[in-house]
Image (cartoon, rainbow, N blue to C red):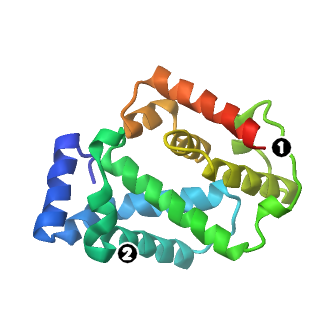
Amino acid sequence: MKKLTPVEEQMLLDEIIKNGKKEKLIQQYWALIYYIVKKTFRQKYLLFSDDDIFELRNEVFLKLLDNDCKRLKVYNKNMGVSLTGWIVLITIRTVIDCVKKKDPVGINKRKQTISFENISNFKKNVNTQKNIENNLFLNQAIDKLPFPYKDVLQLYLIGYSMDEIAKNIGKSVPATVTIKSRAVKKIKEII
C-alpha cells in the first residue's frame, strides 16, 4: 500500500474508531507489520519461522483493535509520531515482549558489558552467542529510555535511516541525530 499523508492517516483513524472499519487498518498495514516483525527478529538475532511472523503480526493487530481500539484511541499526532510510526513502535514492542517471555531470567541478571565506542557496530556484528547476549542486554537498556530516545534508537538499530526515522517521529534530520546521540549517552549511563 502507498504511504499515507498525515491527513489520510487521520481520516483512516477516524474511520476505524468512529465507523468500526477495522479492515481498512489491516489492509493498509498488513505488509508493513509483517516486514517490521521479520526485521526485528533478524535484528535481535533470533531464529524464527513464517508461523512466528504470522502469529506476531496477528498479535499486533489484536493489540491495536482490542478493547474497542484502545491503543489507537491513545494515539496523539501531537506527540511527534505519525500513525504509521506509532504502529511500527507497537510492533517492535510486541516482538520485544515476546522475546522477554522466552527469556524469563532476563539478560540483566547476566553481568555482561558492552562497548559503546561505535553503536552502529551492533548492526554489523556476526551472529555469535556473545553478540546475541550483548544485543539482548542492549535492548533491555533501550527499553528503560523515555520517549523519544527509545523509539529513535530502536528504529535506528533495526536499520532505518535517519531520514526515515525523522519522518516517522515528525522531526528534522538534525534533531533526530541529536536525539540519537543523547539516547546513546543515556544508554551509557544506564549500563
Q: Secondary structure at mark 2?
A: helix
Amino acid bearing label 1: Ile
Q: Secondary structure at mark 1?
A: loop
The answer to whether any part of residue 121 appears in the image is no
Residue 58 percent across, percent down from the top left = 41, 75
Q: Which one is in front, 94 or 45?
A: 94
Please report the residue visible at 76 percent of the width from the left and 54 percent of the height from the top: 137
Q: Quadrant of the C terminus?
A: top right
**Residue 114 marker:** 1
Label whose residue precedes the other's in the sequence (2 or 1): 2
Please report the residue visible at 38 percent of the width from the left and 51 percent of the height from the top: 86
Task: Determine the image quadrant of residue 129.
Answer: bottom right
Relative to 118, 66 lies left or right: left
Residue 141 percent across, percent down from the top left = 69, 49
Task: Determine the image quadrant of residue 39.
Answer: bottom right
Count neighbours of disc 1 (C-alpha within 10 A) and say few if under 14, some if 14 to 19, many if 20 or more: some
Q: Which residue is mark 2?
A: 62
Amino acid bearing label 2: Leu
Residue 185 percent across, percent down from the top left = 69, 31
Relative to 143, 79 lies left or right: left
The answer to whether any part of residue 1 appears in the image is yes
Count neighbours of disc 2 (C-alpha within 10 A) and say few if under 14, some if 14 to 19, many if 20 or more: few
Residue 107 percent across, percent down from the top left = 78, 62
Please report the residue visible at 44 percent of the width from the left and 74 percent of the height from the top: 59
Q: Quadrant of the N terminus?
A: bottom left
Please report the residue visible at 37 percent of the width from the left and 75 percent of the height from the top: 62
